[in-house]
Structures are given as structure tokens and as C-alpha cells.
């Protein structure tokens, strides 16, 4: 309703109005505002009242799918809207459908607009919040937790993305609305550009003329920094770093072109922070710095990131122990494969480089171009790999127009003073120009002096036995696409296996992706040098030029004492002394090399990292031809025995010999093919030749082992005889060992959840691991199988073995082993094997440490009971008292020998699991005893559950007699071939009931027993700590309830007793 105003008949205007307003889904994009808007507006319950001079408005505003500059709010914003002259326009909208932020803050818009320069606002969006007010032309605002991605700034394709992080203000930002400038302090959590990332950025932000300026900026890369703004540190962080890294900067960015200028200063920086921020892990990444890595092209979408980062459960803690052990073995195999791949890389990863530095850096450029950089870095205490240490690192230079100038890069390390006390210093100096543009030429010179061999041993895969200092001058020219490297390397004060080297020098030229080298090694007092001339094709990944062909050419000559120099070229065989000559020529192609030449040695001493003892008196004649090693004669002494060999072994392409042929020398006799598992296998020595070495029908290399004492650390110690056929090849797949080997008078060790650690540095480095291929392993006389203190049994039988020599757990055995005698420790009790029908059956899928067992065990334990001092029930009248002052049968009153038998059929892992990971009373072991006891009573005796209170004398008796002396008892039983031998404590009160012997002092008794039959036992019992006469006893058990006992000390105790015992 509109009320007009009249004066007479003259219309004077509108006196007032009262209107109801309603609007439905008005497109916001039609509004004439400079900011892009989208969505729809609806008005309900609208009411406009008042006059033209003082209008008043109220209603409910609904915004649907509202977005500002592509920043989308909650799909439904709803709230009151009103206008009154003094207070102006007021809007208060809240999100209705979207989830609240972690702080409970939903999307919302609250505005109070009183005049063009009098505005208050408070806006929340997906956890971010902005608020502000105007004071004339000045807007004062605050901002919290705004994702930078919402600003819609251009992406940087070279870096694989745009700005990211969470922006907040520190204090108020001041905006001049007329001049369009901004000044304020900022805080950005998790800042980044593309793949470059940091933890925190702070500084003063200014904006004017479409350019953003940052002053007093500070970056933190380390997630464990103590300078982080109140953030909770990750769980893997240790104590806060007192000397934290400080990265300060200032600069500016032009928003239209993203052209930038920056000055950076670093105090106590960490090189790991820089490499992590720049995603540098290897040399290729360093060369391509400021170029997006390959994974940037396949980054997950924002919707996929939570799924990628979500924690996935692996494994099953409720799974059987064997399944968990197998899973552990799989993980360890993967780790070993990764370690092998890393070991084959000649240059270690750069993420292993550690050290601190101070630096000043100036940067400028555009994101799509290679930046211009001036740098001055001073580092200290840098380490790379195990032995590379630089006390000081200096890097000065600049990068301009794609050309890197080094002025210079220098690494220095102090060395011990020389003999005259003068200080010494090892250094590497690199200076010159390096073009990052493949077509442009570079010019660099590297100079190294007194560089310890140990510092670069891992980088260049040098042998352990090589020591000394390296001097080198190398000149780099050409472009990265086709570099040229020319120079020489000289070894001074060098030695090989502690044998001094008089001269070692190598000239090299790397050009057109081919390495040409000429080297000579000369030992002191040895006129025979080792000479090496080579031509090898090789191209690095960053190069565009490839070798013209893959033909190789290497020539090696060495004789007599100079043969020790071969140790430089391999880690598998170490020459210690002897006479001989080696002439080799390597030709053909890199993918299929050919080797020709010969080797003749006499009275040599050799070592191998796979064997603890040297091979002595070694004589041999070997010819290299047709890509094969033809052993004409090979023999030597090892481990007090003799080793002989003859045959051919391929260098690359192996003979086609299946596993059955490899085992031909170890084939069973026709009569042994259908083996009766219940019969005792006959053990025979393998055929050892007295004169000529027997050859495999294929002509494969065959080793004859004659009475060798072998010590394979953590695997086997003892005698070895047999014949081993070597299949496979040296370079492709490694050797494969078949044939037959007999073990005698030795010990075979089972793994305990992992392999024995290598005991020498040589063994750790060597990757020369042979593989068993259907090798027949015969356990002959006196072979013990041991596993820590759990198992020690004498075994006999045959196994077929397949798998690598290391890791030992990867071996796949097949066969049946008879367990003749021995012991197995279950809980606190030692069980001994009973009978001759105990077997362990090995199947390939269960591995060497988890055979299927079929065993019977026996043991004896002492059960002691404290006698009650109460009145004893007797056949005498109550007025009469029994005479118990001298009762020989009370000499052992309260002491009972329980003979326990155990039977088990199943896997070794299930046996251990039932003993140690669950209640033994529910285990798969079957128990019986004589005299009979219930299963729980037997379990209590074995597990020590009777020791409820060690403070009581009875508890001490049970514990002492049942656990502490098992080792001594087992030793005496095995040495004297007894059925029983026990040491146990007794008290006077437990032996006599008269007053004279009622004390609680502890004595020690021993019992020696021999089972005549299963029911008749003879024994001798003696108290060792007093003068009580020895007692001779005999027991004949008629049944589980009745037994006859006799005892005598040939003095005053001579009795025969009929016993009846029942338990309830």
C-alpha cells in the first residue's frame, strides 16, 4: 500500500508506503558489479515500510549456488536482511547444507553497509574467515586460514602447479581503497609452488601497482623445527634442534607476468631441507633443477589425494605365526632387491648427503624460464655415503642465460699431519662454465689432491683391499647432450691387501659416449705390472648422444706377484701369494661380450668373502675361449682336505642343463628310488676319485671335495665330501650348484627369524651369491642340527636343496631326516628324543626352518610336597603312637619323580607358536606321565606354575629342582648314558618327622637312575651335604596305582613296601 500526500486537490508526493516484496531465483550474474558473481537470489517475507526520506526494509534472503570469482560457498545460504536509515544495510547469512569446518565454523556472510566508506563485514568459507571495517578510505582487515588455491592465480607449468598453502594475517592488514595498496604481516602454513614445498612462511606483505612485495620473509623447511608457529611436531621428531636453520628473504613478484626478484640469506641451513624442497634425490634431478619432475604430469586430483594418503592396514596380527614369518621373509627379500639395485648404482642418491651451510643467493626471472642466480655458499661438516666427509664446502658462482659459472666449488678435508708435522689437506676443486642448454658448450676443470680412496670407495665401487690417496686432473668440455671428459688419475701411497703399490696411473678419455682408458699398476719389488687397456661404450641418462655401437675392447696382462693386483678388479676372489700368469682379452658387444686368454697359477693362496679360510697350494690351468671358462686342471688344499675341479663354465649364456641333469652325479641308486620312510636310510659316501676327476656328462665344471673341513658362518661347520656340478653362468644369473655333498662330523645351524649377519666388510660388499639347484645333501655320521638353545639333535638322511646360498631362509629343501638322538627345550624343561622313529620332513614351500615333525620325547621332573606336621592316620589304636623316628621310606618323603612323555606331529612353527604365543595347556602336544598326572598338572610341572611363591621354602625347592639344574643334568645323562640324573634340594623337615631333624636348612641331594624296563627302575640316592648313608632303591610299577619299592643303605634301613596311590 502506498499513501499519497495531498494539499487540497494538489498532489504533493508520497506520504508513506507499506509494501510486501517477494523475488524468486534472480540471477546474480546480472548485477552491475566489478566482481564476477554467480548463483541465484530469492527474497521471502519482504516488507518495505516508511517514507521516502526514512525507508525501512526487512526480509529473508536465500542465496543458492553462490560463488565469488569461482569461490563457491555453501549451496544454500539463508538469513535475515534489513535496512534502516541510521544503521544502514545489514545482511546475516548462514550455510544450511555444507559441513562445518574442524573449528565448527560453517559458511556465512555478515555485512553492515552504512555508506560507501563505512562498511563492516565478516565472511567465513570452508574454515577460512575474513573480517574488516572501513575508516574513510582505509580498510582494516584480518584473514585466517585461506587456501591460496582459492585465489585463482596462474599455474607455473615448469614447476608443475600453482601457489598452495594456507594464508593468514598477523594483526590487521591496512588497505588504501583510493590508491589500491595493501600492507600487512602474513603467515602461510605449508607453502609451495608446484612441486616445491616448505613448512612455514612469514613476512610483511605489500601490494601496489599489480606487484606483490615481501619484506622480512622467513621460510622453514624442517618439519621438526622449533620455530614452527605452535604446530604439533610429528611423532618421528626427536629433541628440538637448538641450532635451527634460518632462511630469510625479501623480494617481489609481478602478478601479470609472475616475473620475480628475490634475495635469500641462510644461517645454519640444512642441505637436506633444500634437496627435499626442490625434490632432488639423484644427479639427474640436480641437473634438471627447476624443471618439473616426471611424476608431476601424473599428480592425483584433489579428490584422489585423501585416498592416496589414507593409511592402509597391512598384515594380520591374528594370523598364524608361520604366515607372519613368511610375510616378513617377503618384505626382507624386497628390501634386499632394493639394496642390490642401489649397490649397482655407481653414484649414491643425493638424499644421503648431509651437512650445514650459510649462504646468500640472488634470484630473478620468470617461472617459464631458467632463472638467473648468484650464489655464495659456505658449508661445513658435509657427509655423503659412509666415508665421504668434507670439513668445508665452498660454492660461489652464478647462473645466467642457462650458463652455470663456478668460481669455484671446492670441498676440503683436513688430514693428519705428515711425518714432519706439517698440516695436510685433501680437496676437490671444480671451476669453469657448465651450460644447461644441451647444444651449448661447457668448460670445466676438476682438480683433486690427496683424496682418500675410502672417501670415494662407495661412489666408484672400489674394492675393500685398495687403500691410498688419489690425485686427478680432469677437463670437461662440450654440452650435456654429448660431453667430453679427459684426464688422468694417480694413486699415491697405495696398497692392495696391505701390499704396497709403487705406481698406479690411469689415463682416460670419455667422448661420443665411449670411455677409452689406459692404466698400469706396479707393486713395490715387483717388476711385473698389471696393464689394462679398454674401450667401453656407455651413455648417461641425461645425454642425447648414444654410442655408435656397443662393441667393447679390454686387454689385461699380469704375471707372478702382480696377480695380487687383480684384487682391484673383483671382489669374489682375493689373490694373496703364488706364481702365475693371466692374459685376457674382452671383445664382442656389451650385450654379449666374448673373452679369450689363459690363466696358469702355481702354489697360490686364494681367499673368498664366502669362505673363512684360504685355499692353499692352489695349482691350475684355465683357458678362456668361446665365451667359456675351460678348467683343464684345478686343485688345492682347503680345510685339511683337497679340492679338485675340471670342466667348462660359461661366462654369459649358460649350458642348457635342467635340474635333474645337474644332480646326475648325486642320483640315488635304483634301489633307493622307492624309499621306505619307515626304514633307516643307508648312508654311503659319494664316489670320490682317486686319480682322474670324474666329469659331468655335459662337460660342466665339476668340483670334487675330499675330506674338507668347512666353516660357512651361521650355516654349517664340519666335514664335507662330494662332487658339485656348476651350472648357470658367471655373468647371467650366477652359478648354479648341483651334484651330491655328504656332511659328516659337523653342525648344521637353522636360522632364527633372520640370517647370520655378514662378519666381514668383504662379505657385505660381495654380490656373488651362488644358487643351489637340486643339490643332494646327505647328512651322514654325527651331524647335529642346532637352533640356538632350543634344539640340538643328531640327524641322518638325504635332502634335495634348491635356492640361493644366502639368504639361508630362501633355501627350498625336500626330503626326510631321521632324528637319532638329542634334546629339545620346551619352556624350562629339557626333553630328550625317545625311540628311533623321530623324523623331520622338509617340503620346499615350508623352507629350511619349518619342517614337519613327527617326534616322541621324554623327560623327568621332580615333584616335591611339604609334609604336614599333623597326626598321621595309621592302623594303630588312637592310644598308641606310630614309631616314625627311623623310617627309611620317609627318607624321600615329599619327593616324587614324574616321568613325562610327549608326542607331537606337525610343523616346527606351530610347535613354537603353541609354546610361546598361547597357553601350553591348549597346545597340540600330547602329554602322558608315570605315575599318571592330569594334563594340567603336567603343564604346571613343565612351566613352573607350582612356583606360586618363591618366598616359601617349598617354592624354592620346586624351582631349584625343576629348572635351574637342567643343563648340568642333561650333560651328565648324555655322557654317562643314564636314564635319570637329578640334583635337587631337600630340607630336614621333608626327610624326617622327628624333632631332631625338624629344621628348615636346605641340603642338596642327587639321584642316579637306570631304566631296566619301562616298569623296573634302579636308582641310587645320596644327600651330598650331610653324612646320611647312600640309599639303593628299586621300584617295580605293577599298575598306575600299585607299585613295589625296596630300599637299603646296608645299615639300619632295609625295607620293602607295597604302595597304593590314587589322586582325587
Image (spheres, rainbow, N blue to C red):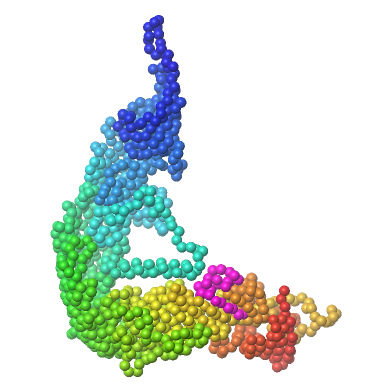
Task: Using residue 189 as the reference point, say whether residue 1014 is left or right of it.
Answer: right
Question: Looking at the picture, how far across and down is residue 719, in whole percent?
Answer: 41, 87
Front residue of 819/188: it is 819
Question: Looking at the picture, how far across and down is residue 778, in whole percent?
Answer: 43, 85
| Quadrant in the rendering for residue 348 | bottom left
| Quadrant in the rendering for residue 962 | bottom right
Question: Looking at the picture, how far across and down is residue 1033, in whole percent?
Answer: 68, 89
Task: Using residue 172 as the reference point, say whether residue 263 is left or right of it.
Answer: left
Q: Is residue 513 visible?
A: yes
- When the figure is inspected, residue 637 is found, relative to residue 404, above or below; the finding is below
Q: Residue at x 77, y 76 (%)?
A: 870
Task: Using residue 276 as the reference point, say whether residue 314 is left or right of it.
Answer: right
Q: Is residue 524 visible?
A: no
Front residue of 838/284: it is 838
Residue 709 covered by magenta stretch? no
Quadrant that contains the N terminus? top left
Question: Looking at the picture, how far across and down is residue 472, in whole percent?
Answer: 18, 70
Q: Residue at x 25, y 56 (%)?
A: 289
Front residue of 22/498: it is 22
Q: Residue at x 25, y 72 (%)?
A: 453
- When the figure is inspected, residue 225 is found, relative to residue 71, above or below; the finding is below
Quadrant that contains the C terminus? bottom right
| Quadrant in the rendering for residue 768 | bottom left
Residue positioned most to the top: 8
Q: Residue at x 68, y 89 (%)?
A: 1034
Give, as a single range, the part of the protein colored magenta. 900-924
Amino acid at each position: 500500500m502506498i499513501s499519497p500526500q495531498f494539499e487540497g486537490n494538489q498532489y504533493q508526493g508520497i506520504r508513506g508506503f507499506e509494501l510486501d516484496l517477494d523475488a524468486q531465483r534472480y540471477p546474480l550474474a546480472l548485477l552491475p558489479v566489478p566482481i564476477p558473481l554467480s548463483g541465484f537470489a530469492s527474497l521471502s517475507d519482504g516488507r518495505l515500510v516508511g517514507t521516502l526520506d526514512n525507508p525501512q526494509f526487512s526480509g529473508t534472503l536465500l542465496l543458492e549456488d553462490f560463488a565469488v570469482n569461482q569461490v563457491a560457498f555453501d549451496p544454500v545460504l539463508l538469513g535475515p536482511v534489513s535496512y534502516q536509515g541510521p544503521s544502514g544495510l545489514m545482511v546475516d547469512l548462514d550455510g544450511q547444507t555444507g559441513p562445518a569446518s574442524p573449528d565448527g565454523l560453517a559458511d556465512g556472510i555478515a555485512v553492515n553497509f552504512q555508506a560507501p566508506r563505512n562498511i563492516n563485514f565478516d565472511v567465513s568459507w570452508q574454515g577460512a574467515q575474513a573480517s574488516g571495517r572501513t575508516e574513510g578510505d582505509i580498510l582494516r582487515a584480518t584473514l585466517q586460514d585461506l587456501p591460496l588455491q582459492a585465489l585463482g592465480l596462474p599455474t607455473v607449468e615448469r614447476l608443475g602447479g600453482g601457489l598452495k598453502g594456507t594464508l593468514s594475517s598477523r594483526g590487521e592488514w591496512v588497505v588504501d581503497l583510493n590508491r589500491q595498496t595493501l600492507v600487512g604481516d602474513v603467515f602461510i602454513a605449508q607453502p609451495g609452488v608446484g612441486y616445491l614445498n616448505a613448512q612455514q612462511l612469514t613476512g610483511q606483505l605489500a601490494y601496489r601497482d599489480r606487484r606483490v612485495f615481501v619484506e622480512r620473509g622467513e621460510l622453514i623447511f624442517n618439519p621438526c623445527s622449533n620455530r614452527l608457529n605452535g604446530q604439533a611436531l610429528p611423532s618421528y621428531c626427536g629433541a628440538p634442534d637448538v641450532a635451527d636453520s634460518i632462511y630469510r628473504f625479501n623480494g617481489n613478484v609481478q602478478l601479470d607476468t609472475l616475473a620475480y626478484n628475490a634475495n635469500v640469506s641462510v644461517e645454519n641451513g640444512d642441505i637436506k631441507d633444500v634437496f627435499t624442497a626442490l625434490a632432488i634425490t639423484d644427479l639427474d634431478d640436480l641437473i634438471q633443477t627447476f624443471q618439473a619432475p616426471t611424476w608431476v604430469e601424473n599428480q592425483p586430483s584433489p579428490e584422489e589425494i585423501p585416498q592416496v594418503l589414507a593409511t592402509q592396514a597391512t598384515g594380520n596380527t591374528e594370523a598364524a605365526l608361520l604366515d607372519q614369518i613368511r610375510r616378513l621373509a617377503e618384505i626382507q627379500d624386497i628390501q634386499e632387491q632394493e639394496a642390490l639395485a642401489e649397490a649397482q648404482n655407481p653414484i649414491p642418491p643425493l638424499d644421503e648427503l648431509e651437512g650445514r651451510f650459510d649462504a646468500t643467493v640472488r634470484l630473478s626471472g620468470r617461472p617459464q624460464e631458467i632463472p638467473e642466480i648468484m650464489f655464495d655458499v659456505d658449508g661445513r661438516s658435509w657427509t655423503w655415503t659412509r666415508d665421504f666427509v668434507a670439513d668445508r664446502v665452498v660454492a660461489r658462482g652464478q647462473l645466467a642465460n642457462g650458463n652455470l659459472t663456478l668460481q669455484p666449488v671446492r670441498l676440503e678435508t683436513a688430514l693428519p699431519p705428515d711425518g714432519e708435522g706439517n698440516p695436510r689437506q685433501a680437496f676437490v676443486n671444480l671451476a669453469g662454465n657448465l651450460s644447461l642448454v644441451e647444444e651449448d658448450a661447457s668448460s670445466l676443470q676438476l682438480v683433486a689432491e690427496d683424496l682418500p680412496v675410502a672417501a670415494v670407495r662407495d661412489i666408484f665401487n672400489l674394492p675393500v683391499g685398495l687403500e691410498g690417496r688419489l690425485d686427478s686432473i680432469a677437463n670437461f668440455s662440450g654440452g650435456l647432450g654429448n660431453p667430453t671428459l679427459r684426464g688422468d688419475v694417480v694413486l699415491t701411497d697405495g696398497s692392495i691387501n696391505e701390499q704396497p703399490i709403487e705406481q698406479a696411473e690411469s689415463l682416460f678419455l670419455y667422448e661420443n659416449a665411449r670411455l677409452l682408458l689406459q692404466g698400469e699398476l706396479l707393486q713395490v719389488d715387483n717388476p711385473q705390472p698389471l696393464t689394462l687397456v679398454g674401450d667401453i661404450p656407455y651413455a648417461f641418462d641425461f645425454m642425447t648422444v648414444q654410442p655408435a655401437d656397443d662393441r667393447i675392447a679390454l686387454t689385461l696382462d699380469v704375471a707372478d706377484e702382480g696377480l695380487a693386483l687383480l684384487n682391484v678388479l673383483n671382489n669374489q676372489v682375493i689373490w694373496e701369494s703364488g706364481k702365475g700368469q693371466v692374459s685376457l682379452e674382452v671383445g664382442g658387444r656389451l650385450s654379449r661380450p666374448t673373452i679369450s686368454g689363459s690363466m696358469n697359477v702355481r702354489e697360490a693362496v686364494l681367499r673368498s668373502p664366502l669362505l673363512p679360510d684360504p685355499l692353499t697350494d692352489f695349482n691350475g690351468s684355465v683357458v678362456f675361449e668361446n665365451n667359456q671358462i675351460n678348467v683343464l686342471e684345478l686343485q688345492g688344499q682347503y680345510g685339511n682336505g683337497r679340492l679338485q675341479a675340471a670342466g667348462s663354465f660359461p661366462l654369459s649364456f649358460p649350458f642348457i642343463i635342467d635340474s635333474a641333469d645337474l644332480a646326475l652325479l648325486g642320483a640315488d641308486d635304483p634301489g633307493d628310488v622307492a624309499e621306505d620312510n619307515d626304514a633307516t636310510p643307508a648312508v654311503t659316501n659319494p664316489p670320490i676319485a682317486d686319480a682322474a676327476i670324474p666329469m659331468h656328462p655335459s662337460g660342466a665344471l665339476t668340483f670334487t671335495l675330499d675330506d674338507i673341513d668347512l666353516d660357512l658362518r651361521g650355516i654349517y661347520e664340519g666335514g664335507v665330501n662330494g662332487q658339485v656340478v656348476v651350472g648357470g653362468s658367471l655373468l647371467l644369473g650366477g652359478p648354479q650348484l648341483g651334484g651330491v655333498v655328504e656332511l659328516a662330523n659337523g653342525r648344521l645351524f637353522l636360522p632364527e627369524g633372520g640370517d647370520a649377519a655378514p662378519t666381514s666388510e668383504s662379505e657385505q660388499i660381495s654380490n656373488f651369491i651362488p644358487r643351489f639347484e637340486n643339490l643332494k645333501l646327505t647328512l651322514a655320521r654325527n651331524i647335529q642340527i642346532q637352533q640356538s638353545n632350543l634344539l640340538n639333535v643328531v640327524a641322518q638322511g638325504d635332502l634335495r636343496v634348491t635356492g640361493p646360498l644366502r639368504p639361508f631362509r630362501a633355501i627350498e629343501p625336500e626330503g626326510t631326516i631321521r632324528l637319532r638322538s638329542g634334546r629339545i627345550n620346551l619352556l624350562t624343561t629339557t626333553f630328550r628324543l625317545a625311540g628311533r622313529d623321530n623324523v623331520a620332513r622338509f617340503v620346499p614351500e615350508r623352507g629350511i626352518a619349518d619342517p614337519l615333525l613327527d617326534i616322541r620325547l621324554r623327560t623327568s621332573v621332580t615333584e616335591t610336597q611339604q609334609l604336614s606336621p599333623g597326626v598321621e592316620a595309621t592302623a594303630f589304636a588312637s592310644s598308641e603312637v606310630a614309631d616314625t623316628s627311623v623310617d627309611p621310606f620317609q627318607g624321600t618323603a615329599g619327593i616324587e619323580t614324574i616321568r613325562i612323555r610327549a608326542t607331537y606331529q606337525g610343523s616346527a612353527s606351530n610347535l613354537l607358536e603353541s609354546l610361546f604365543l598361547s597357553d601350553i595347556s591348549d597346545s597340540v602336544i600330547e602329554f602322558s606321565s608315570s605315575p599318571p598326572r592330569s594334563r594340567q598338572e603336567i603343564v604346571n610341572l613343565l612351566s613352573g606354575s607350582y612356583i606360586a611363591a618363591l618366598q616359601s621354602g617349598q617354592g624354592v625347592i620346586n624351582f631349584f629342582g625343576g629348572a635351574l639344574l637342567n643343563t648340568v643334568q642333561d650333560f651328565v645323562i648324555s655322557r654317562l648314558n643314564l636314564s635319570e640324573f637329578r640334583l635337587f634340594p631337600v630340607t630336614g623337615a621333608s626327610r624326617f618327622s622327628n624333632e631332631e631333624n625338624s629344621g628348615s636348612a636346605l641340603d642338596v641331594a642327587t639321584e642316579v637312575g637306570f631304566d631296566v624296563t619301562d616298569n623296573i627302575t634302579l636308582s641310587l640316592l645320596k644327600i651330598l651335604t650331610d653324612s646320611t648313608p647312600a640309599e639303593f632303591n628299586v621300584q617295580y610299577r605293577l599298575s598306575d596305582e600299585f607299585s613295589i619299592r625296596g630300599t637299603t643303605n646296608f645299615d639300619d634301613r632295609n625295607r620293602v613296601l607295597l604302595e597304593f596311590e590314587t589322586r582325587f
